[in-house]
């Protein structure tokens, strides 16, 4: 699950164009020639250095030097976008975390910080630093309440953790899951996704969201709520073995409870009613297995 977080986002979101050297040094290219502002030579050299140095760490250092000298330049936004894209391509989680921290120290405006927040969260998750990942998400999501992709992934991660007795993310994961389900059920497509990609995403992840919510409710001993969510998951994806197994386990639990109740009842209408319930439960279970 964790390995797909940024991969799915990369597929779903529009690609960010990588800025070339001319793009960084020719910010005036979209303006009429008479109104174009020439890039000063010293700034142009600083921009060229960012482009020519090798490796994200070296580019980040060159960008830091640029901001210290030309922090009020209109080209700062392009530099921030370029560097954030370079960092997102780093595979090593520890290096990516370090680079995002350096980026935030240099590009400290809210809109700049958000350029690397998702990259940072993904790296923290892959490094198993879940406390930090959820903490960073708690800062990011209030500014981006419609980020259904992040809400979905954190909801599912929280359910996975709960299954391994780590319950510290249960409440927030349930909240994220509810919001993500609401967005998908009401077809609130993110602005930066195509209708086709959004439909594919909903088809793949909505049943898993219902499944994760069912898991969380089951572990909270809300069996009716868990069964409802799991049945919705099956309605959307009838072949998921994990969901089917959980529903089968819950049916068996219900049957065993009825068996105990039957054995405890005295002979009479009450005992016959419990037996009838048990047979009905077995019948429903046999139909669901077909």
Image (cartoon, helix red, strand yellow):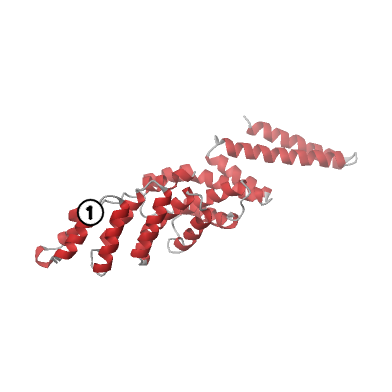
- Give the x, y percent position of residue 281: 72, 37
- Give the x, y percent position of residue 155: 53, 51
Write the residue at 63% across / 40% down. Answer: 246
Observer able to see residue 187:
no
In which quarter of the view is residue 103 placed?
bottom left
- Taking the view exactly as shown, the residue that stands out farthest to the right is 267
Q: Which residue is mark 1?
A: 51
Q: Nearer the viewer, residue 172 or 59?
A: 59
Observer able to see residue 14:
yes
- Taking the view exactly as shown, the residue that stands out farthest to the top is 290
Q: Is residue 247 left or right of residue 135?
A: right
Q: Is residue 174 left or right of residue 140?
A: right
Q: Nearer the viewer, residue 271 or 93?
A: 93
How many numbered discs, if any?
1
Q: Is residue 99 left or right of residue 150?
A: left
Write the residue at 58% across / 48% down. Answer: 161
In which quarter of the view is residue 263 placed?
top right
Q: Is residue 188 left or right of residue 159?
A: left
- Give the x, y percent position of residue 202: 46, 46
The quarter of the rendered structure image containing the C terminus is top right
Q: Residues within 10 Å of mark 1 (few under 14, many from 20)?
A: many
Helix, strand, or loop for circle 1? helix
Write the residue at 60% across / 56% down. Answer: 168
- Taking the view exactly as shown, the residue that stands out farthest to the left is 34
- Give the x, y percent position of residue 55: 29, 50
Q: Nearer the viewer, residue 254 or 66?
A: 66
Q: In the rendered image of this protein, does residue 230 appear above or below residue 31? A: above
């Amino acid at each position: 699950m964790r390995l797909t977080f940024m991969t799915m986002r990369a597929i779903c979101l529009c690609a960010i164009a990588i800025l070339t050297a001319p793009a960084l040094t020719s910010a005036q290219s979209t303006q009429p020639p008479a109104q174009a502002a020439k890039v000063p030579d010293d700034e142009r050299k600083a921009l060229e250095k960012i482009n020519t140095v090798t490796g994200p760490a070296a580019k980040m250092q060159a960008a830091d030097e640029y901001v210290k000298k030309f922090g009020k330049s209109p080209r700062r936004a392009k530099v921030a976008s370029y560097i954030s894209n370079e960092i997102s391509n780093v595979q090593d989680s520890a290096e990516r975390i370090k680079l995002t921290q350096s980026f935030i120290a240099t590009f400290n405006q809210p809109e700049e910080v958000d350029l690397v927040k998702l990259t940072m969260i993904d790296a923290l998750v892959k490094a198993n630093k879940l406390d930090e990942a959820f903490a960073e998400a708690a800062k990011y999501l209030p500014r981006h309440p419609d980020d259904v992709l992040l809400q979905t992934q954190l909801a599912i991660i929280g359910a996975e953790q709960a299954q391994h007795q780590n319950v510290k993310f249960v409440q927030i994961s349930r909240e994220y899951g509810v919001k993500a389900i609401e967005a998908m059920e009401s077809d609130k497509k993110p602005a930066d996704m195509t209708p086709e990609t959004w439909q594919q995403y909903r088809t793949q992840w909505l049943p898993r969201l219902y499944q994760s919510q069912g898991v969380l409710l089951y572990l909270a001993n809300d069996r009716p709520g868990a069964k409802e969510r799991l049945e919705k998951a099956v309605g959307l994806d009838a072949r998921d073995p994990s969901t089917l197994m959980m529903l089968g386990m819950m049916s068996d639990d219900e049957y065993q409870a009825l068996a105990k109740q039957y054995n405890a009842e005295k002979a009479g209408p009450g005992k016959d009613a419990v037996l009838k319930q048990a047979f009905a439960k077995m019948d429903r279970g046999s139909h669901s297995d077909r």
